[in-house]
């Protein structure tokens, strides 16, 4: 069978290598396989699992499906996912103009030029990952996510490599908190994730619905969810809704990066972070993402 290819147009500035570098930041990642020149992703298209290899092409990105026949509808779904995943519809020229006038951002944007804000197009994955990561180390968060995905997600093996799709909310909604406890989830986190899954399964929470809301309304709705505080809501707006003004002001990584780049011995205060954030106005999420990227070094 001849592989099917899908070409996705991309506007400059965009650097796929920079995006791949970010995607390779953890060897424990279970949701994709990133190499030096490609990322492999298992797409859940209306319940059908399609394996795609994403590479840089002459006119943007090229998604190759080596083992599947895909329909035009499949291609539309995959392109929508990829465009959201890499934030391809964002006009980031404004961010680069801001950075050139900003002493803190200028060296970061020059070093990582073309990096896009890589997110989580799936709302349940974004919320579950944010809850998993609350108040634990990033490495342990990756461990919990892998356990969760490998137990309740769906898998597909191609050429000896196993790829995973994130658990669907309707499957997680049927669980009891004790089902997650033996994977070292706290009782609270288990309750939160199952509760979110149940809301999504019941139809009272959906990305499609939230897309019709203003950023402020999305924030309010997310905060109504048990287990979702200000940081989680800001993070989900940033990573799932491509809200460039979202600003997770209490984020530990953001504070760590600011301390480093400001050459501070002491921690930055919350008030200082808010003040610095005002200088990012309109691009708070991108500024945060580039600061996060700087923490990983040359991964």
Image: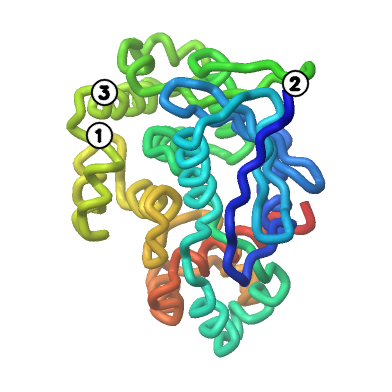
Please rate how many residues cluster around mark 2, counting C-alpha atoms within 10 Å: few if below 14, some from 14 to 19, many from 20. Answer: few
Q: Is residue 83 above or below residue 255?
A: above
From the viewer's side, name the closer residue of 63 and 41.
63
Residue where numbered disc 2 is placed: 161
**Which numbered mark, 1 or 2, is in the foreground of this view?**
2
Residue where numbered disc 3 is placed: 201
Q: Earlier in the sequence, mark 2 or mark 3?
A: 2
Q: Earlier in the sequence, mark 1 or mark 3?
A: 3
For marks 1 and 3, give the CA distance: 16 Å
Q: Secondary structure at mark 3?
A: helix
Label 2 near label 1: C-beta < 8 Å? no
Q: Residue at x 71, y 31 (%)?
A: 3
Q: Which of the 4 quarters of the picture holds residue 141?
A: top right
Q: Is residue 288 left or right of residue 194?
A: right
Q: Is residue 130 visible?
A: no
Please rate how many residues cluster around mark 3, counting C-alpha atoms within 10 Å: few if below 14, some from 14 to 19, many from 20. Answer: some
Q: Residue at x 35, y 23 (%)?
A: 169
Rendering coords of residue 136 (x, y %): 52, 37
Residue where numbered disc 1 is placed: 226
Q: Residue at x 37, y 46 (%)?
A: 232
For marks 1 and 2, give the CA distance: 37 Å
Extreme-right residue of the structure: 36
Q: Is residue 78 above or below residue 110?
A: above
Q: Is residue 125 visible?
A: yes
For marks 2 and 3, give the CA distance: 31 Å
Rendering coords of residue 291 (x, y %): 59, 65
From the viewer's side, name the closer residue of 279 and 251.
279
Q: Is residue 189 above or below residue 101?
A: above
**Which numbered mark, 1 or 3, is in the foreground of this view?**
3
Q: Is residue 207 left or right of residue 260?
A: left
Q: Is residue 173 left or right of residue 105?
A: left
Rendering coords of residue 80 (x, y %): 46, 46
């Amino acid at each position: 069978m001849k592989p099917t290819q899908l070409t996705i147009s991309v506007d400059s500035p965009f650097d796929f290598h920079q995006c791949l570098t970010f995607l390779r930041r953890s060897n424990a990642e279970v949701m994709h396989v990133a190499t030096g020149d490609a990322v492999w992703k298992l797409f859940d298209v209306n319940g059908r699992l399609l394996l795609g290899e994403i590479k840089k092409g002459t006119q943007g990105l090229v998604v190759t499906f080596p083992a599947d026949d895909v329909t035009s509808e499949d291609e539309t779904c995959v392109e929508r996912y990829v465009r959201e995943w890499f934030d391809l519809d964002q006009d980031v020229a404004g961010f680069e103009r801001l950075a050139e006038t900003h002493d803190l951002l200028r060296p970061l944007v020059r070093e990582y030029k073309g990096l896009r804000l890589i997110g989580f197009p799936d709302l349940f994955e974004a919320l579950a990952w944010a809850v998993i990561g609350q108040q634990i180390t990033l490495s342990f968060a990756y461990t919990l996510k892998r356990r969760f995905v490998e137990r309740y997600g769906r898998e597909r093996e191609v050429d000896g490599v196993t790829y995973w799709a994130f658990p669907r909310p309707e499957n997680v909604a049927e669980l009891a908190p004790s089902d997650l406890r033996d994977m070292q989830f706290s009782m609270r986190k288990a309750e939160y994730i199952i509760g979110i899954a149940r809301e999504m399964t019941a139809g009272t929470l959906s990305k499609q619905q939230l897309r019709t809301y203003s950023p402020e309304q999305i924030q309010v709705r997310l905060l109504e969810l048990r287990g979702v505080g200000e940081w989680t809501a800001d993070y989900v707006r940033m990573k799932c809704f491509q809200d460039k003004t979202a600003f997770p002001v209490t984020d530990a990584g953001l504070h760590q990066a600011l301390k480093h780049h400001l050459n501070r011995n002491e921690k930055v205060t919350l008030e200082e972070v808010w003040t610095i954030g005002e200088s990012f106005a309109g691009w708070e999420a991108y500024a945060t993402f580039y600061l996060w990227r700087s923490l990983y070094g040359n991964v």
